[in-house]
Amino acid sequence: MDNQNARLAGGEGFRYDLLRRQPRFGLLVRTQSPGEAELLPAVAELAVLGPVQVLDAGNHFDAIKVAYAIRHITPDLKTASENLQIVRAFTCIEVVKGLQQTPAGAPLIILDLLATFYDEAVSDKRSALLVEQCVTQIRRLAAAAPVVASVRDDGPTSGPRSNLLQLVRQAADLVDEESLRLTQAQTRMF
């Protein structure tokens, strides 16, 4: 897979552009928030259309917000809710297992993918290996349906784990970086 990422200017365009691409692995890189404000409405929209899988790697899935978003689209909350498959992962090993056990074919939203990979209880080498395993599984899943992951850009900037975000960024077909948009906006101001 070539490592040239398409960088888009906004969340809405990012979401809809992703659905037209193959293979389709999109990455939202955010400076503080792990992107749930943008991804939870997308989960609701996808659930109204059919099955959607969510891997919550950072404990950010808010079922009430998703239910409200579904209600704004359709009165049939029951059917849309039945289309949701949610897996919560509390360790980086559970993130890998969650991806390995996810069947290909339905869109997958991963909330705060790298949240648990900076845990000091896991060695640096093991953490990098587990991220590589995640990337392999994401590529497998993206070959069949869109995969969108959010990550925070607040990990270490130096040291052995400073490359974890770069490993995921290089695997993505589309990257939406909040810091890039902020820099562009600041440049336009002057």
Image (spheres, rainbow, N blue to C red):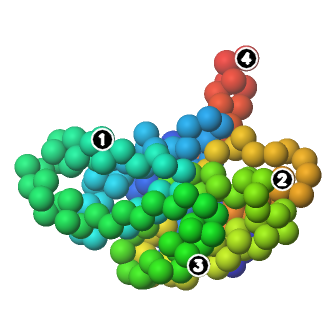
Q: CA distance from mark 1 to mark 4?
A: 38 Å
Q: Are marks 2 and 1 in contact (CB under 8 Å)?
A: no
Question: Callout 4 environment at 10 Å: few (<14), some (14 to 19), or many (20+)?
Answer: few
Q: Quadrant of residue 25?
A: bottom right
Answer left or right for 157 relative to 52.
Answer: right
Seen from the viewer's position, the closer of residues 60 and 145 is 60
What SS does tag 3 mark? helix
| Residue of label 4 | 190
Q: CA distance from mark 4 to mark 2?
A: 32 Å
Q: Are marks 4 and 2 in contact (CB under 8 Å)?
A: no
Q: CA distance from mark 3 to mark 2?
A: 21 Å
| Residue of label 3 | 137
Q: Are marks 3 and 2 in contact (CB under 8 Å)?
A: no
Residue 155 at x, y = what percent?
75, 45
Residue 70 shows in this picture: yes
Give the mark nearest the N terminus, 1 or 4: 1
| Residue of label 2 | 162
Residue 109 at x, y = what percent?
45, 61
Q: CA distance from mark 3 to mark 4?
A: 43 Å
> Does 176 appear above or below 133?
above
Q: CA distance from mark 3 to mark 1?
A: 28 Å
| Mark 4 residue type | Phe
Give the mark nearest the N terminus, 3 or 1: 1
| Residue of label 1 | 65
Of badges 1 and 4, the one in the foreground is 1
What SS does tag 2 mark? loop
